[in-house]
Image (cartoon, rainbow, N blue to C red):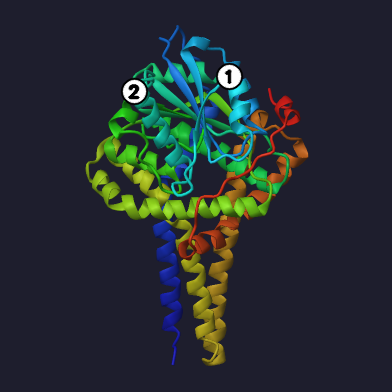
Amino acid sequence: MIDLELIQWIVLLNVCLAVLFGVAYFYQLVYLVIGLAGRLRRRPRQRGEAPLHRYAAVVAARNEAGVIGELLRTLREQKYPAEMLDLYVIADNCTDDTAQVATQAGATVYRRFNRVRKGKGYALDEFFRWLAREGRDRYDAYLIFDADNLVDPNFVGEMNRVFATGKYDAITSYRNSRNFGTNWISAGYALWFLREARFLSAPRMALGSNCHVSGTGFLVSARTIRENGGWPFHLLTEDIQFSVDCAVRGRRIGYCDRAVIYDEQPTTFRQSLDQRLRWSKGFYQVEAQYTLPLLRGMARGGRRGWACYDMLMTVAPGMLLTLAVLLFNLLVCGAVLFEPTYVARQVVAVALEFLWSMVSGFYVGLFLYGLLTTLTEWRQIHAGTGKKILSLFTFPLFMFTYVPISLAALVKRVEWKPIYHTGGKKMARELP
C-alpha cells in the first residue's frame, strides 16, 4: 500500500533535483548579466598596429564544390597582407570537383582518401603531418574553417590583434548565420550560436576564463599543434574534445568578437537529426574520456580550476538529467494506477504539476534566452522582422527536440556523416 508519505518524498526528490540543477548552472546567469552589460558598453577597438603574423587558412571539405569557391573568395579578399595568409583545402574523400574548384580559387589542395578514418579530426591530423614532413609548417597559427563559411573582410586582422597579445593558444570567433531566415531549423541553430557568442564566449573572455571553439572559425597556434604532434582529436565532436583538452592542460582559449564568420545551417530535419546525433554522441564520448581529468583540474583551483568546472558543465548530460526527471514522474504516475483512488489522484496531480512546471519553465527560459539574444544581436541577424519574432517561439521547440536525440545517441551507434550545403551567390550577396 502506498501511503501519503510517498507524495512528500516525490516532492522532495523533485525539488532536490531542481535545486541541484539550478546550483550547478547558476553561474551561467552571471554570464548572462555580464553579456548584457558588455553589449550595452561595447569594448572599444584596440589602438595601434599589432605585429603581423603568418597564417594558414585550412578547410577540410568533402564534396563541397558548390560552396568552396565562395569561401576562398572571401579569404582572398581579406584586409590583411596576402603574403601573410596561405590557403589550404583538404579534399577529404571527395567524389565531386571540390579539389579542382579549390585549386582554381587559389588554394593549395591536398587530396585524402581514407574510408575508415573519416571526419574532420582525422583530415586535420593528416594535413598537419603532411606540412611537417614537407617542411611547410612555418606558420605562427592556423585558421580553421568549414567549406560553407563566408568570412568578413576584417576577420584575419581582428584575430591577429587578439593573437598578438601572446596570451592565447587558441581563439574562437563570432559565429553568425548566412541563412537564419530559411526556416525554424536554421533559425534555431543560428540563435544557439549567437547565444554562445554573446552569453558564453564574451563573459568568459571578460572574466579571463577559457572559451571553447565551436567547429569552425577558430585559430589554433602552431606551438599548440607542434606540442600535440598534430591534431589528435578524433572523437565525434573533435572541437569540444580540443576545448576540454585545453582546459585540462591549462591552455587558454580566447574570443574575438570583431572576427565574424557566416555559417550555413542545416534546413531539413533529417540533416539536423544526423548532425545533432553526432554532437550528442560526441559529448558523451568527451564526458567519458575527460570527466576524471576535469575533476582533477577543478581541484587545482584558480582560473584553471574554474575553466575545468565550466567545461565539465558544458559536456555534462544535462538533457539526460531532464529526461530522467520526466521518466521518473511518469513512472510514478503509472505505479499508482492500481492504488486507492484518493492516493493515485494526489500522486498523479503532484507529478503532473511538477512536469508541467518543468516543461513550461524550460520553454519560458529558452524563450527569454532567445529574446535577449535577438535583441542584443538584432542588427547582426540577417532576416526580416517577422522571421526574427517567429524564431523566438520556435527556438524552444528546436531545443526540445534535443531530448529524444540525446536519448537516441545514448543507445544508437553513430558515425560521422557529411552535411551537404547549397550556398549560392544569392545568399552571399545578402550579407554585408
Is residue 44 in view?
no
Residue 152 spot, x, y in % from top left: 60, 22
How many neighbours does mark 2 have within 10 angstroms: few (below 14), some (14-19), or many (20 or more)?
Answer: few
Q: Amino acid at mark 1?
A: Gly
Q: Give the quadrant of the C terminus.
A: top right
Q: Is residue 76 left or right of residue 381?
A: left
Q: Give the quadrant of the N terminus.
A: bottom left
In percent of the image, x 53 and y 55: which residue is there? 277
Nearest the camera: 293 or 419? 419
Residue 27 spot, x, y in % from top left: 41, 44
In percent of the image, x 28 and y 35: which residue is there? 250
Which numbered disc covers residue 167?
2
Q: Amino acid at mark 2?
A: Lys
Q: Based on the displayed image, in which of its 4 quarters is residue 130 positioned?
A: top left
Identify the residue at the far left of this view: 300
Whichever of callouts 1 and 2 sits on the residue coming sooner in the sequence is 1
Identify the residue at the far top of this view: 48
Secondary element at tag 2? loop
Nearest the camera: 280 or 120? 120
Check whether the beta carbons of the residues at disc 1 and disc 2 lie within 8 A of each other: no
Nearest the camera: 278 or 362? 278
Q: Nearer the viewer, mark 1 or mark 2?
A: 1
Instruction: Answer above or below: position of 142 versus 48.
Output: below
Instruction: Answer above or below: position of 432 versus 234.
Output: above
Q: CA distance from mark 1 to mark 2?
A: 32 Å
How many neighbours does mark 1 have within 10 angstroms: few (below 14), some (14-19), or many (20 or more)?
Answer: some
Residue 319 spot, x, y in % from top left: 49, 58
* Residue highlighted by disc 1: 106
Instruction: Answer above or below: position of 210 versus 409.
Output: above
Secondary element at tag 1? loop
Nearest the camera: 362 or 62? 62
Residue 292 spot, x, y in % from top left: 27, 52
